Amino acid sequence: MFEFLKKKIGSWFGKDNKEKKPKKEKKKTAKSTGKTEEKEKKIEKKTVEKIISLTKKEKETKHEVEQIIKEAEMPVEKQSLVKDAKEEKEEGNFFTRLIKKITTSKLTKEDFDEIFQEFEITLLENNVALEAVDKIRDSLSFDLVGQQMKKTEAEARILQALKDSILKLLIEPPDVFKQIREHPGVFVILFFGVNGTGKTTTIAKLAYLLKKKGISCIMAAADTFRAASIEQLKMHGDKVGVEVISSQYGSDPASVVFDAIQHAKKNKIKVVLIDTAGRMYTKENLLKEMEKIVRVSQPDLKIFVGESITGNDAVEQARTFKEAVGIDGIILSKADVDEKAGAILSVSQVTKKPIYFLGTGQDYENLEVFSKKMVLKNLGMG
């Protein structure tokens, strides 16, 4: 999970900063030149000594001359590798440049904005929404601009500031199981999403989890539009041992919802999980199709289900559903194969709603309660 962003951040704060590989390459190349090339490029020691004697910084100059000799003996392609490594090391990355500035003088807003550009590009490449990137920039800027610190404390302070900036993007979800247990009567959860996001499977996973925790539930097949949707939900119901309330294709989905809630009340079933048609509506159609279901069901939770791996698409879908019918929270599927983390870092910031669960596999037990600590851990910062 989050492999791309994790590796990038790890290279800044980890051992990779020390540029060990170019040094090894350099030593290996110097040894591999052999006696033949050494003979071909003889440089008289007396000449070198004269060069050294002409400068006040004798040791530094000697080192530079020796380096020139070594590089002259290298094959052209090896010289290029060493040159690239040197340039990269001199320029530094986001983290090393920030440390250099903040340990030599007070960090100005202009310096911070210039250095942050590299991190901004990294975040955008990992599908983090622009609003979330701006939030990270503002948080880091608030914590670091105007500061000057010793090198011994700079790394820890900057890392903590980065952690804090990421945590501010996220909303810790309430304990949904506690909410359900403390709620008087039937607890209704209504699910929205587009086709292909794993919404129906996610509902089945939650039914499995509720049953495992000793909370009774039923599923309502209110998707009467998509072919085989009712059969799909019933198949899941059979596998997890949860009853499915359904009707015929083309029937009013609101009537299915009404029947399911009445059935739950009559049989003292605690939770009704409502599956709805997964279509990308315009706002007008969304209101017409969904408002009636919302009005009939009076849901205690309205959950948007999206695919974590779709990044900004999932964020925009969540925004659309929030504006059209309102949502209380989010579940993101396929988080286990999400290498970029863009949707997870962005969706709460954009919608101001928490992520309740992450889908982390194909099995029914692969539904993980979301937490801020889990995100930091998967980014290698926990």
Image (spheres, helix red, strand yellow):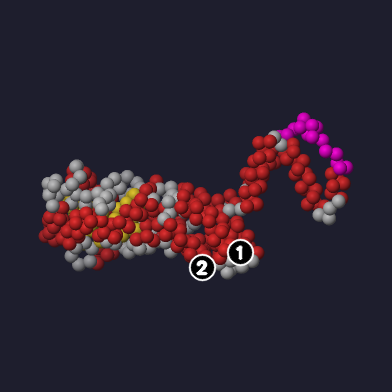
Q: Going 85% across and 39% down the picture, which residue do you hit?
A: 44
Instruction: Give the x, y percent position of residue 110.
Output: 57, 63
Amino acid type, mark 2: Phe
Instruction: Give the x, y percent position of residue 5.
Output: 48, 51
Q: Is residue 367 magenta?
A: no
Instruction: Give the x, y percent position of residue 129.
Output: 41, 55
| Span of residues in magenta | 31-47
Lateral position of residue 65 relative to residue 327, left or right: right
> Extreme top residue here?
36
Does residue 373 lie above or below 5 as drawn?
Answer: below
User: For the residues marked 2 and 1, what is the alpha-carbon distance in whole angstroms?
Assistant: 14 Å
Q: Going 66% across and 47% down the picture, which residue do you hit?
A: 86
Amino acid type, mark 1: Ile
Instruction: Give the x, y percent position of residue 224.
Output: 17, 48
Q: Going 74% across and 36% down the picture, which residue do you hit?
A: 73
Mark drawn on residue 142: 2
Q: Going 69% across and 37% down the picture, which residue do you hit?
A: 29
The answer to whether the residues at label 2 and label 1 have Cβ atoms under 8 Å apart is no
Whether residue 49 appears in this view of the structure is: yes
The residue tagged 1 is 102
Magenta stretch: dominant secondary structure: helix
Q: Nearer the viewer, residue 23 or 116?
A: 116
